[in-house]
């Protein structure tokens, strides 16, 4: 049996809108709840949440039972980190802080078996290969891994055309908060200069036939980005949603 089909990758390639939720609590219970809510995908955030392979594994299992696609943001663009999460069964990765085409190529190579890449041949004893049940996993695994890279700096935007031409990069996700900070607007995320840069970057990504992604915490902004052609749309975080609900409840008198 080969590697399972990556239905999220197929949907994004077909240009279908895919809405999702960030998971920042490191909780399999929260992941299960979010998975059952009806999102197209949920992203386990190992960059800004507890990075523990065992915790990631439990969240992946919780999401698998819900039918919602899982995405994993690694903490760093590093081959051994990507190898580890792929062997846990992740098929879609988001790689942060990719500023150059060379860094994008490194991310792709880390996600592919030789000769196209440098991923180690260990899935036969890991969850990715069904602990040996997917005997032909490696025959199509390269094709089923979806690689999304994050552009979240002025350097990344300067190199965006080159990043988008890297073979194996399926999409580019704009990190609005880090981009704003790098542009000098850390406390003014909606500064017109930032918004203009984000809109322009989305246009560049789409002009190369790549999936464009972003996260936004307001319905108005999400509608704006949907209109621009974003199809990998983050709608917020379970941590933020829980915090808002708790604060609202505590404020009742």
Image (tube, helix red, strand yellow):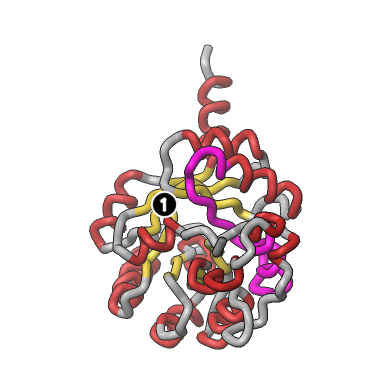
For the N terminus, the quadrant is bottom right
Count of marks overlaid on the render: 1
Instruction: Report crowding for label 1: few under 14, some 14 to 19, many 20 or more residues within 10 A (C-alpha).
Output: some
Image position, residue 56 (x, y; %)? 68, 50
Image position, residue 21 (x, y; %)? 48, 46
Say left or right for 72 vs 216.
Answer: right
Write down the quadrant of residue 133 in the picture: bottom right
Q: Is residue 78 magenta?
A: yes
Q: Which residues are magenta?
A: 63-88
Residue 184 visible in this rendered orientation of the protein: no
Say left or right for 34 vs 191.
Answer: right
Q: Which residue is mark 1?
A: 216
Q: Is residue 24 above or below residue 120?
A: above
Which of 133 and 253 lies nearest the eye of the viewer? 133
Q: Residue at x 48, y 78 (%)?
A: 168
Write down the quadrant of residue 32 in the picture: top right
Q: Which residue is outermost to the left? A: 227
Q: Residue at x 24, y 58 (%)?
A: 227
């Amino acid at each position: 049996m080969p590697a399972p089909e990556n239905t999220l990758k197929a949907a994004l390639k077909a240009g279908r809108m895919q809405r999702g939720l960030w998971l920042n609590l490191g909780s399999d219970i929260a992941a299960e709840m979010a998975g059952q809510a009806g999102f197209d995908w949920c992203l386990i955030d190992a960059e800004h949440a507890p990075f523990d392979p065992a915790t990631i594994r439990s969240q992946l299992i919780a999401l698998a039972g819900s039918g919602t696609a899982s995405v994993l943001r690694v903490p760093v663009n590093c081959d051994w980190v990507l190898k580890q999460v792929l062997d846990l069964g992740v098929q879609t990765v988001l790689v942060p802080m990719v500023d150059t085409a060379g860094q994008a190529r490194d991310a792709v190579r880390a996600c592919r078996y030789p000769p196209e890449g440098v991923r180690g041949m260990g899935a036969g004893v890991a969850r990715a290969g069904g602990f040996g049940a997917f005997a032909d996993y490696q025959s199509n695994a390269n094709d089923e891994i979806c690689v999304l890279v994050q552009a979240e700096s002025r350097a990344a935007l300067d190199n965006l055309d080159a990043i988008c031409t890297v073979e194996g990069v399926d999409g580019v996700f704009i990190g609005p908060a880090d981009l704003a900070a790098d542009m000098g607007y850390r406390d003014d995320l909606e500064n017109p200069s930032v918004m203009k840069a984000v809109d322009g970057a989305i246009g560049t990504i789409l002009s190369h036939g790549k999936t464009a992604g972003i996260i936004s915490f307001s319905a108005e902004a999400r509608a704006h980005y949907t209109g621009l052609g974003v199809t990998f749309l983050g709608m917020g975080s379970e941590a933020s949603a829980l915090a808002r609900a708790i604060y609202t409840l505590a404020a009742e008198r």
